[in-house]
Amino acid sequence: MTPNGAFDTHHPPAPDLMDACVHCGFCLPACPTYVLWGQEMDSPRGRIYLMKMASDGATAITPKLVRHMDTCLGCVSCMTACPSGVDYGKLIEATRAQIERLHRRPLGERLHRRLLFSLFPHPGRLRLLRGLLAVYQKTGLQKLVRQSGLLQLLPVRLQAMESLAPKIGKRRKIAEWIPAQGPQRLRAGLMLGCVQREFLSEVNAATARTLSAEGCEVVSPADQTCCGALHVHAGEERPALERARRMIEVFEKAAVDVIVTNAGGCGSHVKDYGYLLRDDPHYAARARLFSSRCKDVTEVLDELGPRAVRHPLAMRVVYHDSCHLQHAQRVRTQPRALLSAISGLELVEIPEGAICCGSAGIYNLVQPPTADELAGRKARLIAPHSPDAVATGNPGCMLQIGAALARIGQPIPVLHTIQLLDASIQNKKPVG
């Protein structure tokens, strides 16, 4: 054992953050896994207790401890509920980094994680996968495979990947520079993401059009890479740091006033670059400046105020809060205000709005049974409202909820908030 117990000396879970937890239990009804199972060790305070035990040397990093940390979605809804202000997000990320360095996972898990990280942070590879999926869908092979029961022969995690694949349509390529319409109000840098760039490119196109219509010059550097969010949430610290440095360099060259994100998970991560790179003498100050310029697109539009004319949308829309948008970024009122300002649009709230849909980065691909249970719960809360669409602010949520609604026979379109705003400004029917 080291002075940090079972953990090594590189950024173990911070004692002051663990000690801030007074075990009051306010986090319990906010935690998705506790809501599902009612088990103390699958709650935030239970996991903090395990972290402290490992830090004190009272336990090793055992498979059982790892399982309790793995089943955490990292949705940080507990942080919103916590009266003591415990920064649970930093604790779980530090613990997961320790696990990946010090614990050897079973071969199957290692291979699956290697597959995921060889694909999702690489837009070029995702583009190739996109082409293969297009063939799979358009030839009718997907329908045949699903009806034949062949999917049941695959491992559960690969079945999850197949079930979440979006319908492949036309890929929208975003110009590197789009001028502002009318007098310029901002020079905005647009983060394109990885999965969103290749599989939900219509969201980026709607974001660029809306920013331009509202007087923003839009710069979307073609050489931007993955932001590293998936890596850091899964404990893969080194590649997360490398991608953060690269993202900072790219947007420094772009010389923008604000860096706009439209994915809740990515947005919360880049806003934390200052903390992530706190020990790097060459990037610490640059990272803090970068993070200070990052804003979700709904924050930017809410602060600017409307200039482009909004046209009516006669729609009933359920709003789903992305966890990292509402809990980590604290962006809740802005999306609702922007949607509520559209004439004819009825915005509907659902119960358990703070509970995760089960997407949570790569969670739905590494813990599919739990993710499906949460997604089904969310879909069953949405369906009775008979909405024309569901609006949210994260690509993972869009895919997760869309798949869950389809499973219960309710194929309701799931759109990004910005797609509805874009449709109102363009005076067109929103298309997913």
Image: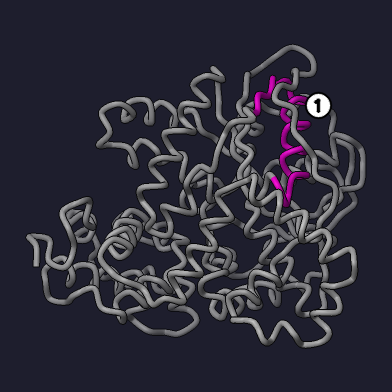
Per the rendered image, the range of residues in magenta is 198-220
Residue 3 x, y percent position in the rendering: 7, 60
Q: Residue furthest top?
A: 183
In the depicted structure, whether residue 131 falls above or below residue 160 = above
Is residue 134 covered in magenta?
no
In the depicted structure, whether residue 124 falls above or below residue 106 = above
Q: Report whether 181 appears left or right of 193.
A: right
Residue 375 x, y percent position in the rendering: 63, 73
- Residue at image position (48%, 79%) is 35
Residue 352 x, y percent position in the rendering: 58, 69
Count residues near mark 1 (Cα–Cα under 10 Å), then give few for <14, some for 14-19, many for 20+: some
Residue 139: tell me if it is visible.
yes
Amino acid at the residue labelled 1: Ala
- Residue at image position (64%, 82%) is 154
Quarter of the image containing the N terminus? bottom left
Q: Report whether 420 appears left or right of 252.
A: right
Q: Report whether 310 appears left or right of 60.
A: right
Is residue 219 covered in magenta?
yes
Q: Report whether 293 appears left or right of 383.
A: left
Q: Find numbered disc 1 in the image and state the secondary structure of the residue it sits on.
A: loop
Figure coloring: one colour
> Which residue matches tag 1?
308
In the depicted structure, whether residue 113 falls above or below residue 314 = below
Quarter of image, res 145: bottom right
Residue 83: tell me if it is visible.
no
- Seen from the viewer's position, the closer of residues 152 and 278 is 152
Residue 429 x, y percent position in the rendering: 91, 47
- Residue at image position (26%, 70%) is 23
- Classified by dominant secondary structure, the portion drawn in magenta counts as helix
Q: How many marks on residues?
A: 1
- Residue at image position (83%, 50%) is 345
- Seen from the viewer's position, the closer of residues 344 and 49 is 49
